[in-house]
Amino acid sequence: MKQQWQAAKQVIRQLETAGFEAVFVGGAVRDALLGRPGHDVDVATSALPEEVKTVFGKTVDVGIAHGTILVLDAGEPIEVTTYRTDGEYVDHRRPDGVIFVRSLEEDLKRRDFTMNAIAMRADEQIIDLYGGRDDIAKEVIRAVGNPSDRFAEDALRMLRAVRFSAQLGFTIEPATLAAVKEHAHEIAFVAHERIAAELEKIWVSAAPKAGIDSLVESGLAHHLPGHIEDHQARWTSFCANKAAVGWAYLAFLNKDGQGIVESYRLSNKIKNFIQQVLAAYNKLLDGWLPFDYFTYEQDVLEAAFDFAIWEGKALPFQKEEISRKKESLPIQARQELAANGHDFIEWHEGKGGPWLKEAIEQALLAVLSGEVQNNKEQIRDWFIHDFLNEG
Ligand code: ATP
Ligand code: MG
């Protein structure tokens, strides 16, 4: 983090030396003022993208259409964005075009909230044109300018307000909240991927239930897929260390994994996680067998366990036991089974057939349950005396 600030400062100094203006801006300045561990340090500059590229040796055009250049000269990669105002807003979505400007004041004016519109120079002088520091001290989220106009331009800002309230524990200032309520239905115009990115930040925030409450109170929940308002109270104990758990819980509450995946265009990785957690949850109600501990990853089992607890179900074991159970399994992966397909065929006098798959499955179960030890002789005995005799 400190290295990023150092690197960003070096980038700002170099731009200044070349005759341009440059500042720290956005989330990093906000979080630094809040004393929160920050994230990416962004730099804004009066230099046009082409000019930025002439100042530095190593750059990457990461978002040149929006004025963003990644500078690699300073050890840490630093995003440098040209001062800009937004072009025309169509359909309440982020504008396609941007207009580069030379004035910091104009750049700050297009930012969403006062706490996000604070700039800082390399010498730590703060430029705070909208009372962002006051609002940070008061812990309020306030739109820059007229909130109704700002949400009409870009409806995603409403969801960002809710997301920041869950992350920071701030309240949405009354006029800003009133404007969210007024424009809540326009969230439907925003790309589902952008909505999903904000919701994910709510799932992993310090206060996800506060985020859910704020989604409902603001009216946004009503216009988002997933019937969030119907299940509001069930989020009371929810907490997650990764976004996939939030998606799985939303799917669980809706009893519809596929619907949530499609509505929010979730990745295959998250889709698989959801399917696994829902399956593990269903088995949990009868108690997990060694095979379940073997089949499901620890994070899947832990999520299913949490769901049961959040639902007020009494479970006869502690969450900590999940890892112990997994570790004490005789094998951790199928390849560790001491006998393979060739062995079974050999023991069956060279004949293959549909029985083979079944034999391997049953051998696995027998080993996992401790009925048969995981060595070739024992598995062979079991195969000849139990499996073949039964079949
Ligand atoms: P975090 O990175 O923690 O999500 P952030 O404030 O840095 O928070 P970003 O999405 O990284 O948020 O955006 C960086 C800055 O760009 C914001 O601080 C804000 O000034 C501005 N910004 C981002 N999205 C919008 C938007 N939809 N409308 C107006 N300004 C925005
Ligand atoms: Mg950021």
Image (cartoon, rainbow, N blue to C red):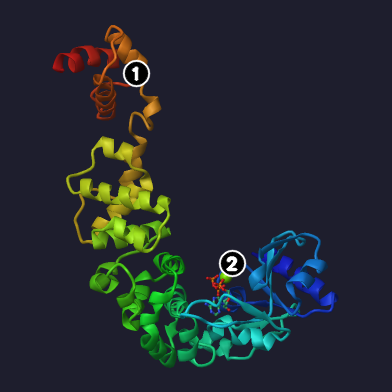
Residue 318 versus residue 83 in the image, above or below: above
Residue 182 versus residue 255 in the image, above or below: below
Instruction: Name the residue rendered at 34%, 34% in the picture.
Output: 328
Q: Nearer the viewer, residue 2 or 76?
A: 76
Q: Decide if ligand 1 comes within 8 Å of the CB at mark 2.
A: yes
User: On the rendered image, what quadrant is the C terminus found in?
Assistant: top left
Residue 322 versus residue 128 in the image, above or below: above
Q: Is residue 140 left or right of residue 261?
A: right
Residue that numbered label 2 is attached to: 39
Q: Nearer the viewer, residue 21 or 132?
A: 21
Q: Is residue 10 left or right of residue 354?
A: right
Q: Earlier in the sequence, mark 2 or mark 1?
A: 2
Instruction: Name the residue rendered at 35%, 78% in the picture.
Output: 220
Residue furthest top in the image: 349
* x and y percentages locating residue 174 in the rendered image: 41, 91
Label placed on residue 300 = none
Q: Decide if ligand 1 comes within 8 Å of the CB at mark 1.
A: no
Amino acid on which disc 1 is placed: Gly
Helix or strand or loop: what does disc 1 sit on? Answer: helix
Helix or strand or loop: what does disc 2 sit on? Answer: loop
Residue that numbered label 1 is attached to: 341
Mark 2–mark 1 Cα distance, whole angstroms, equals 51 Å
Does residue 82 show up? yes
Residue 219 versus residue 294 in the image, above or below: below
* x and y percentages locating residue 260 in the rendered image: 32, 61
Amino acid on which disc 2 is placed: His
